[in-house]
Amino acid sequence: MADEIITFKIEGPIIKDDYPLHEVVSILDSFHSIIDVSYLVLAGKNRMTRAERQNFRILATRAKPGSLIYDLKFVYETVEPLLPFVPQLTSLDVWKSSKAAYEFLKALINLRRNGKVYTVSAPDNQGIIVVSTPGSSPINVTQNIFNIADCSLDSYKSITNQIEERRIESISAVDKKKEGILITNAEKKLFNPETKLEDNPVNVNGKIFDFNTEKLTGKFRVSDGQPIPARDYNFVLIGDQNFIPYIMAMTVPQVTMRCLPEIEEHTTGVKYIFRLQALSLIGT
């Protein structure tokens, strides 16, 4: 199968003959995670096993002077003994899905920052997700693109956060058509908006349906009639809390979380709850 060649570039004043390896490695690692997510979603896998890594890998070639530029080769090979167990994909499939998911993510975030209320549905159950906004044309993507976007959001937050004036000014990954992923200060503000905490905590009823014990973060589905709008929120534990009650809370239909809403405030004046800072669970 043909390999896909992507030109990956990091530009900024700190990229000289000698450059800070830690920051560069962090950027490359986040980008690799973004591409891995595309592969795993398309392959219907949950994690990159040793066999999966043998089939799909990214090779860095032809480093160029002046700025940090690599030609990255997306290699997808099927080892004969593994043929019955691996998905029939191409490197181009993975790259095209990564590009589409990035554009979809930006479109959703822009809707939100402009105060647009949107709904997500799968009207015909044919693997097509429709994002509808009153007064605007709907956005249609496949279920795979939707899942890739959802799973790669944290990696985009990480990689865009590396942009810093007088240090790293742009990061890009483009193909021979000059299409791909471009990250500048505008994307940093998009994925990592400035936030502020509300002054007073609120008690909110809802359902905890996901929790990460390493990052101490989770997802909270807020019910109707609460002090904040009903929808799904990300939350993070604040202070030296025991996370076990949050895990146990996933086994019950509803809990009350005492939290501080963390607010995005954009130049348009639109305010949006970015996430909840969890102070405690009431009654646990």
Image (cartoon, helix red, strand yellow):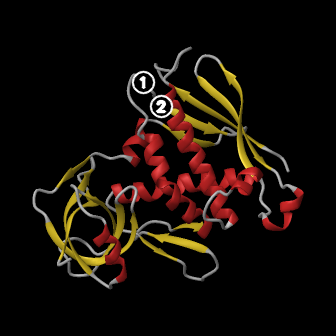
| Crowding near the residue tagged with mark 2, few <14, some 14–19, many ≥20 C-alpha atoms within 10 Å | few
Q: Which is more N-terminal, label 2 or label 1?
A: 2
**Residue 69 percent coordinates (x, y):** 63, 27
Give the answer, above or below, for where 78 lies relative to 280: above
**Residue type marked 1:** Arg
Secondary structure at numbered mark 1: loop
Which residue is pictured at 42% across the width and 69% down the height?
Answer: 133
- Along the line of sight, the residue nearer the viewer: 223 or 259: 259
- Hey, what amino acid is under mark 2? Glu
The residue drawn where x is 13% and y is 64% is 201
Tell me residue 277's x, y (percent).
Answer: 24, 59
Image mark count: 2
Q: According to the image, label 2 marks what residue?
A: 23
Where is residue 149? Give x, y as percent.
Answer: 53, 59
Q: Quadrant of residue 65?
A: top right
* Near-viewer residue (110 or 198): 198
* Relative depth, front residue between 242 and 267: 242
Where does label 1 land, which residue? Answer: 167
The residue drawn where x is 40% and y is 48% is 191
Q: Residues within 10 Å of mark 1 (few under 14, many from 20)?
A: few
Q: CA distance from mark 1 to mark 2?
A: 10 Å
- Indicate left or right for 166 with 265 as reference: right
- Tags 1 and 2 touching, CB below 8 Å: yes
